[in-house]
């Protein structure tokens, strides 16, 4: 059996199209243009690529994009002052501080200084708590994109066995919360999990978000399972990007699988734009 390939690129284009339609209506009916501010501290090349891509897509859906680039040696006080200014700026509906931040800056402190209503990353402690307690939260973009693809493929996720590999605050933990909210039986596996292959093999849904290239191989996958690969790994001596799943072996066993690239990646930015639209709509009640 060969798995169905879940086309994240096409799905993301559809989501962005719907966002663009809403933006057009907001402008025409209410004279409001959603605005997303992205803050980049330092010159990390990967972060620069992400930020450029976010800015381009923000403009493409008709929103205003505000880029705030600061040198790596920016002080915490200066960064907090910038966030404070964005928090009170009525033209800014979403704020994203690109991570990782340089080591001298306290990431938790910086993230928690963002107005939770403008926290389009869903990383603020208030949004984390709201999600965990099933209340209306800003939901982190990557897990939200994964959930949208899973719902699209399965319809209802109720009762399915889901294994999330990786326990990060950005992906693993919120992914588990979202799957739980959709009534999956959820396990989080990680680097210390014993017999991880057997744990993963129980799953109807596998979400791999560990950052270890090709860790998950086809023999870990239950036949017919859905595999969502969040990994984006660059490996010297290998061309292009590698996922956390070994695609060639997993595709032979899975029922459906996301490719890398062209799977989860494009969905993340589409969900960021959707979150910005949500923040804007809520701000204007
Ligand atoms: N760095 C890597 N992924 C992300 C993300 O989703 N949001 C932010 N702010 N930084 C990141």
Image: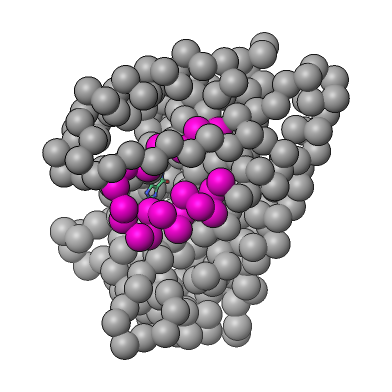
Quarter residue 74 falls in: top left
Determine whether 49 is above or below 2 in the image: above
Quarter residue 149 falls in: bottom right
Instruction: Give the position of the N terminus as an image quadrant.
Output: bottom right
Give the residue at x 63% y 66%.
6
Q: Nearer the viewer, residue 158 or 62?
A: 62
Locate residue 100, reporting x and y percent.
Answer: 28, 47
Q: Nearer the viewer, residue 192 or 117?
A: 117
Q: Is residue 149 visible?
A: yes
Locate residue 13, reporting x and y percent.
Answer: 70, 55
Determine whether 100 is above or below 281 in the image: below
Asked if residue 152 lies left or right of residue 186, the reply is: right
Locate residue 111, reporting x and y percent.
Answer: 32, 29
The segment highlighted magenta reads 36-55
Locate residue 247, reporting x and y percent.
Answer: 47, 79
Give the residue at x 85% y 25%.
28
Q: Nearer the viewer, residue 179 or 34?
A: 34
Instruction: Give the position of the C terminus as an image quadrant.
Output: top right
Determine whether 259 is above or below 164 in the image: below
The reply to whether the magenta stretch includes residue 42 is: yes
Asked if residue 72 lies left or right of residue 123, the reply is: left
Q: Nearer the viewer, residue 23 or 40?
A: 40
Asked if residue 108 lies left or right of residue 202, the reply is: left
């Amino acid at each position: 059996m060969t798995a169905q390939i879940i086309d994240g690129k096409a799905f993301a284009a559809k989501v962005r199209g719907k966002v663009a339609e809403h933006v057009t209506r907001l402008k025409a009916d209410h004279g409001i243009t959603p605005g997303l501010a992205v803050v980049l501290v330092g010159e990390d090349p990967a972060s620069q690529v992400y930020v450029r891509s976010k800015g381009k897509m923000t403009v493409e859906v008709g929103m205003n994009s505000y880029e705030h680039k600061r040198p790596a040696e920016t002080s915490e006080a200066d960064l907090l002052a910038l966030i404070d200014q964005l928090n009170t700026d009525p033209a800014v509906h979403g704020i994203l501080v690109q991570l990782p931040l340089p080591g001298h800056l306290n990431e938790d402190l910086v993230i928690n200084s963002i107005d939770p209503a403008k926290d389009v990353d869903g990383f603020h402690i208030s949004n984390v708590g709201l999600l965990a307690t099933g209340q209306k939260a800003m939901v982190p973009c990557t897990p939200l994109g994964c959930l949208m693809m899973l719902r699209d493929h399965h319809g209802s996720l109720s009762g399915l066995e889901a294994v999330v590999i990786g326990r990060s605050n950005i992906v693993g933990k919120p992914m588990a919360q979202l799957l739980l909210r959709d009534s999956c039986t959820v396990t989080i596996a990680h680097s210390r999990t014993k017999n991880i292959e057997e744990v993963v093999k129980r799953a109807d849904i596998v979400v791999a978000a560990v950052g270890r290239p090709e860790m998950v191989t086809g023999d870990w996958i239950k036949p017919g399972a859905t595999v969502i690969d969040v990994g984006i790994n660059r490996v010297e001596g290998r061309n292009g990007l590698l996922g956390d799943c070994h695609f060639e072996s997993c595709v032979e066993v899975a029922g459906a699988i996301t490719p890398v690239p062209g799977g989860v990646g494009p969905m993340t930015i589409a969900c960021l734009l959707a979150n910005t639209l949500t923040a804007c709509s809520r701000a204007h009640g």
